Image: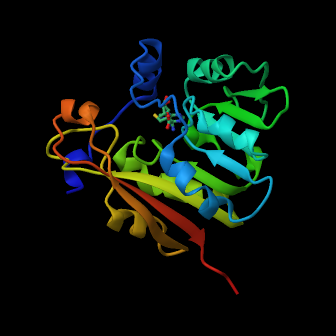
Amino acid sequence: MLEQQADRIMQLSEWEERWQENKIGFHQPEIHRMLQINYNAVVNRRSSVRFFFPLCGKAVDMKWLADLGHSVVGVEISEMAIRQFFQENNMTYSEESLPSLPGATLFQNSEKNISLYQCDLFSFSSSVAGQFGAIWDRGSLVAINPKDRERYAALILSLMGGDCRYLLDTLLYNPDLYKGPPFFVPDKQVQSLFGSSCNVELLQSVDALTDRQRAWGLDSLTENVHLITPKATN
Ligand code: SAH
C-alpha cells in the first residue's frame, strides 16, 4: 500500500505557490477538534509547555495554546503563511534573520510566546530552539514527501525532550484513489518510524470523510491520533 505514493514529490516552491494562489484547503479556521479532545493527554497537567508545530501553516491552534499559557515554536516555508497568521490574529510581530540558520527568518509576536521560523524544516534542528515538551503534528508527517519519512522521524525524535508528548495526526485512505498530499500513513509505519525508541498509543480514530475528500475521489477517510512518548531509559 505504500508504493503507490512512494515517488510523489512536492517541491517547496509548489507549497509556496499554493499559498500565493490561496489554494490552502488544508487550513482550518477553527481549533482542531482532535487537539481539543486530546489536550489533557498531551499537556498531562503541566503548565507552560513548549509546543513544537512542524509545518505549521497558519494553524489557529498555535494562538489557542499560547492563550492557554503555553509557548509555541513553528516551522513553515511560506513567508506569506506566517505573515497571515500574525495579521489574522491581530498580533504585532517582529522579524529577524538568523546568522546560525542562513536564509531563515524568525517571526515573533510581541509577547514572544509564538516564534515561527520561516525555513525548510530539514534545515531546522535542536541547536536552533532546543527540545520540546510537546508536539502537535497535524498536516505535517502527512504532508512531507513519503521518501523523507525516516529523515523526518529522526529529526522529530531529536527535538523531543525527555518528557515530550507528541500528538500525531495521520490519515488512512485508499492510495490507489488519490496521489496526495496529504499522504496516506498507515499505523504500521507510525510504529516502525517511532516504535523502537517510543511508546506509540492510538488515542482516537474517526471517520473524517467530507465533500472535500470525496472530490479527490476518496470513498473513505479515517483520521487517527497517536500519542508518542519516549520510552523510559535507565
Ligand atoms: N499544519 C498546518 C499546515 C499543513 S499543510 C495546518 O494544519 O494547517 C503543510 C504546510 O507545510 C504548508 O503550509 C507548506 O507550506 C509547509 N511545508 C511543506 N513542506 C515544508 C518543509 N519542508 N519545510 C517547511 N514547511 C513546509
Residue under the point 49% across and 55% down:
168
Q: How are the colours assigned in the image? A: rainbow
Is residue 202 rendered to the left or right of residue 234? left
Which quarter shows the N terminus?
bottom left
- The answer to whether residue 167 is seen in the rendering is yes
User: Based on the displayed image, in which of its 4 quarters is residue 59 positioned?
Assistant: top right
Is residue 224 rendered to the left or right of residue 94? left
Residue under the point 76% across and 47% down:
70
Residue under the point 21% across and 53% down:
3
User: Based on the displayed image, in which of its 4 quarters is residue 118 positioned?
Assistant: top right
Q: Is residue 149 above or below residue 95?
A: below
- Residue 106 horizontal/vertical position (percent): 74, 29
Which quarter shows the C terminus?
bottom right
Along the line of sight, the residue nearer the viewer: 8 or 186: 186
| Residue at the right extreme of this rendering | 111
Along the line of sight, the residue nearer the viewer: 217 or 39: 39
Q: Is residue 227 above or below residue 77?
A: below
Along the line of sight, the residue nearer the viewer: 56 or 101: 56
- The answer to whether residue 157 is seen in the rendering is no
- Residue 25 horizontal/vertical position (percent): 39, 26
| Residue at the top extreme of this rendering | 21
Residue under the point 50% across and 57% down:
153
Is residue 113 rendered to the left or right of residue 1? right
How many dots with numbers? 0
Is residue 154 rendered to the left or right of residue 10? right
Q: Is residue 224 above or below residue 68?
A: below
- Residue 31 horizontal/vertical position (percent): 55, 38
